[in-house]
Amino acid sequence: MLGGLGALAAAFDQPYLFPSVGPTVMVLAERPRSASAHPRNVIVGHVIGLAAGLLCLLVFGLRHAPPVLHHRPSAARVAAVVVSLALTTLLLQLLRAPHAPAGATTLIVSLGLLKSVHDLVAIGTAIVFVAVVATVLNVATRRRRSLRVDNPRDSLLTNAMRDVTVGREESVEVLPAQRVWPGDRE
């Protein structure tokens, strides 16, 4: 998938490969049935990250400032980073669209690394490409059963606590890449 994205980046001279696409691909490959890997959450998460980062660049007067890599971060840059990440987290929680790699997209924009409209469109295009290709592959290989929206509130911790407090006896599916600890059911 990253190879295809890289080939498109080279062919069209676009910044389709950027830091947060790596963690997104990992979530889609490692946990295809999780709420974080649902295509809606992937796309919504990164769009919110892009918007929050850009909004904070505008609000803090950093739209045309050089990226943070070229100088020490100013108080305005630090504020833009903090506020944009908080805004991304809040909106993803409110929309029940968990996707942690979107936080990296927020930082990429609020740090000024990629901030032109051209860059932001390229990031959005890359995320849609990755979400669609991964979903098609995961459904075709039955790693993802359907496009049903999973309940993001049903995290592993929430389910574990509910199972302990309710005392339910359920079998747990263990994928080959997971380690089975002593005492775990197989």
Image: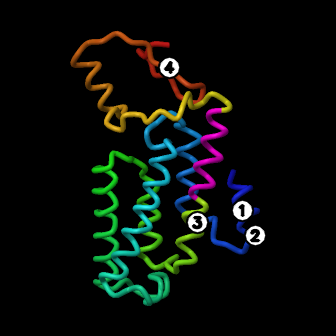
Amino acid of disc 2: Ala
**Crowding near pointer 2: few (<14 within 10 Å), some, many (20+)?**
few
Q: Which residue is mark 4?
A: 173
Q: How is the image coloured?
A: rainbow
Q: Which residue is mark 2?
A: 10
Q: Which residue is mark 3?
A: 18
> Can you tell which mark lies on residue 134?
none
Give above or below for 160 relative to 85. Answer: above
Q: How far apart, in angstroms, are the residues tagged by discs 3 and 4?
A: 33 Å
Amino acid of disc 1: Gly
Which residue does the image show at 52% across and 80% down from the upper left? 116
Nearer to me, 174 or 121: 121
**Crowding near pointer 1: few (<14 within 10 Å), some, many (20+)?**
some
Q: Is residue 59 a member of the stretch shown in magenta?
A: no
Which residue does the image show at 69% across and 50% down from the upper left? 1
Whichever of labels 3 and 4 marks the residue nearer the N terminus, that label is 3
Callout 1 touching callout 2 (CB < 8 Å): yes
> Can you tell which mark lies on residue 6?
1
Whichever of labels 2 and 4 marks the residue nearer the N terminus, that label is 2
